[in-house]
Image (cartoon, rainbow, N blue to C red):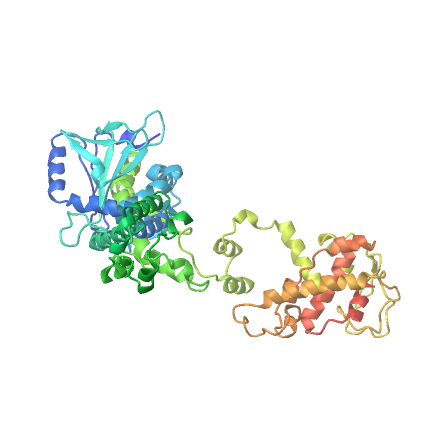
Amino acid sequence: MGILDKLRGTPAPGGTERKQPAKSMVAAAMPLSGPGVRAVARARTASTTDQWQKEAWYYFDVIGEARSPLVWIANAVSQADVYATELDPDTDKPTGPSDDAMASAAARQVLGGPQQRMGLLRLIALCWQVPGEMWIIIRPTGAGKPDQWHVLSGSRLEAKGDTWQYTDPTTLQRVTLTSRDRLIRAWCPHPDDQTKADSAMRPALPVCREIEKASQNIAARLDSRIATNGIAILADELSASGDDFMASLMNAAELGLQNPGQASSQVPVAFNAPGELIANGGAFAHFDLNTAFDGSVVDLRDNGLGRLAKALDMPNDVAEGTQGESNHWTAWQVEESTYKIYIEPLLKTIGDVLSEHWFRPALILMGMAPDRAARFELGWDTTAIVARPDDTENLRDLHDRILISDEYMLTENGVPMDAMPSSEERTRRYLEKVVLGAPTLLADPNVADAVGLDIEVQPVAAGVDAEIGAGGELETPEPEPAPVPNALPGTRGDAPDNEPPEGLTAAAEVLVMQALDRAGGRLLTNQNRGRFKDVPRHELYRQIRPEDAGSLVEIKFADELARSFAVRPGALRVALEMYVTKLLSTGEAYDPDELRWYLR
């Protein structure tokens, strides 16, 4: 049920004295009814310059270059997710998401729960940046339903007699707050008089006035240019037909105003005049009324936009809308610095306000001891906000060295834990890598079965390699007097007699080249980029020797190729993986005769 069902008649937070150091307050819970309402309203009116806040909202509405970066910051803030965190008793610093069920349940209801939280966080961020002040209203709905949350701009709540009233933004009904509700005023304190609100837009207002006037000047001149283009003077010799000429000129001007986008409005007006006047240039004179100032208005407006970007409380590239022009390697740094300097303080302030005036009192009324409730506060998960550098290669290296866990590796790469393979799949995939390096292990029927190869295993003598026949079965050569283990044959002199089907070698060569190309792409790490521009990707393995060749091997379409030539898919795939692994391990050049040996 709604937590505020239990907060009736207690507008100000209660509980025991907190042990941690006091924080600077930027919010207060207001009395909702009684004589205190009038006193609070009078004090707030005396300490607030309401006119500049109205002007800030006006320019937010009419100047897109001011609105866009403020909305960008607000959208970033709205991506944060809230959680309950417990403070360390020694340092008073948050210890990360808490496992306490009661605290977590209360945190999930903050700002109306997941359904409302994003929109309300966006409103809070906009109110913080434009008027610098907001009201947070929490109302119980009863009947076991979640509390109703609203965020209103500072001027949207009024004191009527001994109560507060506002217009519900969803129903447009006038609402009078009662003692069952909870009202919190939050504001960005001005450094000089901390009872007054301050905002990022306040120092930018003079610049916004200049930008507006420059835009109005440009728009007025555009309209004026459509209506008239300077002054036209006619020679006296045209007086006989002057009336007709002026009538034609006025008709052309009216048509141009009615159809400013049509080509007809750009056609010059034609009239007749004596030839000698035309030759002397004296029949008609035109005077342009533009001044030197008119040509500089656009530059003045552009200069004002640059000053606006510097005045707003955010990085210049965000204010100017150029953060998207950063290259791949520096974009994350801009976002990281933006979060640390501009977004994190706002989220911390919101968390402190809600923790002090709603979260801890709610925990107490849910049954938590006051001393323990004082150790909790609201924290923010900013995974969706902060874009960090691609650290995949470093993480992979640490994971290969068994210095970080599988769970941490998945979490840092944004992969859910349920994507981890089962123990059976992990065993099979591990054995596949081992078998690629030592194919003789397939002589063990348990290994062959584990990697999913449906082959008939023949017993082999110790130290003698098993070879793959054309039908996919393992063949055992006769033992030699002095056998030498050779998992990956280095010579072609001991090739078996059976030949692969005609055309199979040429088709398999395509798959081998594709596999080498994919392996070359994976070898191009950040350290190697740009060093081998003239080397084809399928030959990069000869320049960059991999540490784990088996992990780079990926053969695609082997099963489809095997079916086309009526050979066993598993046998063909293993043969190709063995050959590609051998090339990557030794750095030798591709040899079609050697590929044919593996396919026999």
The residue under the point 14% across, 33% down is 37
Please state which of residues 520 and 472 is positioned toward the viewer in this rendering. 520
The residue under the point 77% across, 54% down is 569
Q: Quadrant of residue 506?
A: bottom right
Horizontal side of 31 relative to 172 (left or right) equals left
Image spot of residue 383 (x, y percent): 42, 52
Please state which of residues 563 and 205 is positioned toward the viewer in this rendering. 205
| Residue 380 visible in the current orientation | yes
Is 390 drawn above or below residue 139 in the view shown? below
| Residue 132 visible in the current orientation | no
Which residue in the rendered view is the most extreme toward the top? 143
Image spot of residue 479 (x, y percent): 86, 69
Count every numbered label the image shows and give the total: 0
Please state which of residues 355 and 93 is positioned toward the viewer in this rendering. 355
Image spot of residue 182 (x, y percent): 24, 34
The N terminus - image quarter: top left
Please state which of residues 320 and 97 is positioned toward the viewer in this rendering. 320
The C terminus - image quarter: bottom right
Horizontal side of 484 relative to 291 (left or right) equals right
Image spot of residue 160 (x, y percent): 15, 30
Horizontal side of 89 relative to 458 (left or right) equals left
Is 134 drawn above or below residue 180 in the view shown? below
